[in-house]
Image: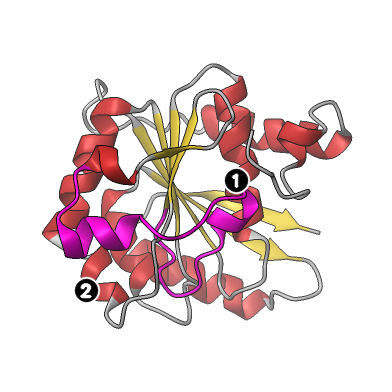
Amino acid sequence: MLQLSNVLVTELDPISPVSESYRSLRTAVRFKKVVPADQRLGMVLMVASPKSQEGKTTTLANLAVTYAQEGKSVVIVDSNLRQPSLHNLFGMNNTKGLLHFFQKGLDVDDVITPTGIIGLDLIVAGGQPVNPSELVGSSQMMNLMNQLKQRYEVILIDSPSTLDYTDASLLTEYSDGVLLVARNGKTKREWAKQARTQLEQSGARMLGMVFNQ
């Protein structure tokens, strides 16, 4: 197994109370009855936050692990081309990923990397381009998501902070549901309200808020 970050508590300490909280989040999403437009395809969840450093990526990664532990086939797409970090959580390098799918025309199989956790794969960002919003809003991104929905039961998208960039709003187009992460002592109430409104105006189905820390 790759060297996992200690924030991946659901894999490293699955019987802890924190891990149980992430499983409770998975159950809450299930009760929302998120159903793709085509029920033969995988479910796409996006995890967003108003600003950076609010626990969005940690929440997404642990939620992904709980789905894999449930026996689902899961892939994470690091669509945060502004500040990619998922490769660090799973002990991977960031040398070949989403950016290379866009710019070098690689096949989907070339950018999918197993995490070492059974059932869980990752597409790293692959770098920080000068035009991230154009890339995540492109027909190539739509093509990628369509292919992933045919291969996986659960697809999780990590996005840049909602209020700082347009990327999160663009990524709602591919998502069946969106979770908004806020951090105790950091996220201002008006930020959370503004982020929710912005995502809803982009067509997002808001599933709820995760209050972190």
- Using the rendered view, name the quadrant where residue 191 is placed: bottom right
Q: Earlier in the sequence, mark 2 or mark 1?
A: 1
CA neighbours of label 2 inside 10 A, class few (<14), some (14 to 19), many (20+):
some
Main SS, magenta residues = loop
Label 1 sits on a secondary structure element that is helix
Instruction: Name the residue at 50% across, 24% down.
Output: 119
- Please state which amino acid type lies under the numbered disc 1: Ala
- Using the rendered view, name the quadrant where residue 153 is placed: top left
Residue 41 percent coordinates (x, y): 26, 26
Residue 143 percent coordinates (x, y): 15, 47
Residue 94 percent coordinates (x, y): 46, 60
Q: Is residue 126 left or right of residue 119?
A: left
Q: Is residue 163 left or right of residue 170?
A: right
Colour scheme of the picture: secondary structure
- Using the rendered view, name the quadrant where residue 4 is placed: top right
Q: CA distance from mark 2 to mark 1?
A: 25 Å
**Which corner quadrant holds the N terminus?**
top right
Viewer-proximal residue, 108 or 19?
108
Marking on residue 61 = 1
Mark 2, residue position: 134
Instruction: Name the residue at 77% across, 40% down.
Output: 9
| First to last magenta residue range | 78-107
Instruction: Name the residue at 21% across, 28% down.
Output: 38
**Which corner quadrant holds the C terminus?**
bottom right
Q: Are marks 2 and 1 in contact (CB under 8 Å)?
A: no
Image: 26 above or below 199: above
Image: 145 above or below 134: above
Viewer-proximal residue, 89 or 159?
89
81 in the magenta segment = yes
- Please state which amino acid type lies under the numbered disc 2: Glu
Label 2 sits on a secondary structure element that is helix
